[in-house]
Each structure stands twice: as C-alpha cells, then as structure tokens.
Amino acid sequence: RREDVEEFEQDVWSVEPSANLNVLGARWSVLGRIAQIKEDAGPTPFRPYFFEAPGTSRSAGLQAQWGATGLLSFNLRYQITDEPGRELRQDLGVETRARF
C-alpha cells in the first residue's frame, strides 16, 4: 500500500486459510488470517486511517449461513481479532435477509 500525499508506504504479507462444510442444513465457514505488517514513513509520519498498525495481526472467525427458503436466509458470524497496539476484539453478528 502506498499513500503518496503523506509519504507513507506499507507492506502486508498474509496467509488467509478457510474451510467450508455443509451440515445440518447450513453452510459453515471457518476463517483465519495472520499478517505481518511493515511500514516506511516520510519525515513526518502520519498513518492513514485505513492502514493497519505495524507488527503481527491475527484473526479467526466462524460463520453459519442457513437458507430457510429461496427468499429468506439467516446468518450468524463470530470473529476474534488481535491487532498490534489494540485490545483483543470480539465481534458477534446475526443477520436476516429477505429477498423480494
């Protein structure tokens, strides 16, 4: 990534394995990510908001998708994220979609 205005550059190397399984009428997904982030900044460093902090970032998640009918579906998602300089973050999401 490069931000020319702020003279800021970042290299991100990551591995993001995933696996899917259809069981109990739902599609289950397991996701993971580990990333090594290195940065190079100009004389007055200012990291753009959407750039990750340097160091090692890790996350893992579990997602279940169930289609009740062709027009109605339910999703359940859990993710845990460990980023440099931040507290451990856990996210839980429930979503229902209706197609008209």
Image: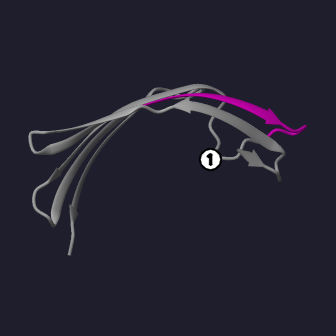
Q: Badge 1 local density, few (<14 within 10 Å), some, or many (20+)?
A: few
- The image position of residue 44, as x and y in percent, is 87, 39
Residue positioned most to the bottom: 100
- The image position of residue 99, as x and y in percent, is 21, 70
Q: Quadrant of residue 54?
A: top right
Left or right, 3 with respect to 89, comes to right
Q: Is residue 81 magenta?
A: no
Amino acid type, residue under disc 1 in the picture = Phe
Above or below, 9 relative to 3? above
Q: Quadrant of residue 19?
A: top left
Taking depth in this image into account, of 20 and 72 the one nearest to the observer is 20
Q: Is residue 47 visible?
A: yes
Q: How many marks?
A: 1
Q: Which residues are magenta?
A: 31-45
What residue sits 20% from the left and 75% below the top?
100
Q: Quadrant of the N terminus?
A: top right
Left or right, 61 with respect to 16, comes to left
The majority secondary structure of the magenta stretch comes to strand
Above or below, 66 relative to 31? below
Residue at label 1? 50
- The image position of residue 4, as x and y in percent, is 82, 51
Q: Secondary structure at mark 1?
A: loop
Q: Is residue 81 visible?
A: no
Above or below, 66 relative to 61? below
Taking depth in this image into account, of 21 and 80 the one nearest to the observer is 21
Q: Is residue 34 magenta?
A: yes
Left or right, 36 with respect to 4, comes to left
What residue sits 20% from the left and 44% below the top?
27
- The image position of residue 50, as x and y in percent, is 62, 47
